[in-house]
Amino acid sequence: MIENTSGAVFINKPSGITSYKSLDTIKRKLATRKIGHTGTLDKFASGVMIVLTGKMTKLAGYFTGLDKDYEAVFSFGKETATLDPEGEVIAESGIPDLATIREKVKSFKGIIRQVPPAYSAIHINGKRAHEIARGGGTPDITEREVAIYTFQILSWKTPDLTVRIKCSKGTYIRSIARDLGRSCGSYAYVTSLKRTAVGKIRIEDTIDSNELDPENDIVRGKNLFSLLPDLQILSVNREIIPGILNGKKLDVKLFPGMDLSYPRFALFHEDDFVALISREMNRLKYNFVSGDLYGSYLG
């Protein structure tokens, strides 16, 4: 039995199973239900998923915000209801030439606006969009702004375009395929999708969940917090820890070396995680405090 299951596991989700189902093996091996992923991958998709466990599930919001890298295949000439291989074909058209596609790709770089797919996990009035769509309704999904940092064409073999895309959180690659197809006077959907990176974590850093070794594959402590952008890791003196654990008002003077250009700070005493705090204007506030240290530092 693993004494401390709090941390992160980086898995390579296979295609053919849902993101939720992919967590079953980890739950079983760690003997815990306190577990969650930080970004859904469609059932047909594969690739990097960051899975948080134990008390580190509180970090989910921070990891969800990380940029993502994908490799995908867009098939032109057809559009499916789900914009992926699992949906029925709802529209067909001619296939554009590569020159047209290259020209239109230019407008999909930088800050763009897109409407997420009808078959998605977006919440609308308490229901998932895909639940509404599968029930025969038309979900009213608001257009959103996302950032496309890079959009590379890797190959073209009619009708399939292989691409590499780096984008912000909340970007739907299926929506890009749909909108690119329509902008070319055609249709398109995603036939293959692999997430190759989440933030600093690349596909090479992941494991198959079936091969999880709880003793060695859980990422913890400073190694975990170093993956978050805009965060400074600070070492604190033992003397101030009881005050932090008791919620004492935070003062910059308590933290020599604090760089106020950062919005967030992970506090450590040696290898012990103490607290995550953040800065708003010139005031510091608690985000969450480690509950593992009370016996050691308040005894």
Image (cartoon, grey):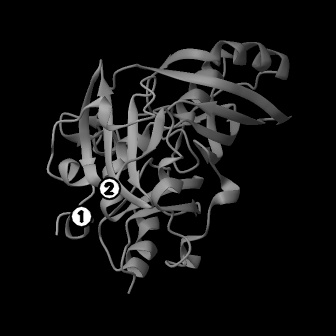
Q: Nearer the viewer, residue 181 or 239?
A: 239
| Left or right: where 205 falls relative to 299 | right
Residue pictured at 56% horizontal, 62% vertical: 11
Residue pictured at 57% horizontal, 35% vertical: 173
What is the crowding at mark 1: few (fewer than 14 residues within 10 Å), some, or many (at least 20)? some
Residue 120: % across, % down: 40, 40
Which residue is disc 2 drawn over? 238
- The quadrant in which the N terminus is found is bottom left
| Left or right: where 20 falls relative to 282 | right
Q: Nearer the viewer, residue 236 or 223?
A: 236
Please say if 142 is above or below 132: above
Please say if 227 is above or below 124: below
**Mark 1 or 2, nearer chain start:** 2
Residue 264: % across, % down: 39, 34
Residue pictured at 69% horizontal, 36% vertical: 74
What is the crowding at mark 2: few (fewer than 14 residues within 10 Å), some, or many (at least 20)? few
Residue 220: % across, % down: 47, 62
Which residue is disc 1 drawn over? 297
Q: Which mark is residue 146?
A: none
Label 1 SS: helix
- The quadrant in which the C terminus is found is bottom left
Residue pictured at 77% horizontal, 21% vertical: 96
Q: Quadrant of residue 24?
A: bottom left
| Left or right: where 27 falls relative to 97 | left
Residue type for callout 2:
Arg
Proximity of marks 1 and 2: CB atoms separated by less than 8 Å: yes
Farthest front residue? Answer: 239
Residue 86: % across, % down: 53, 51
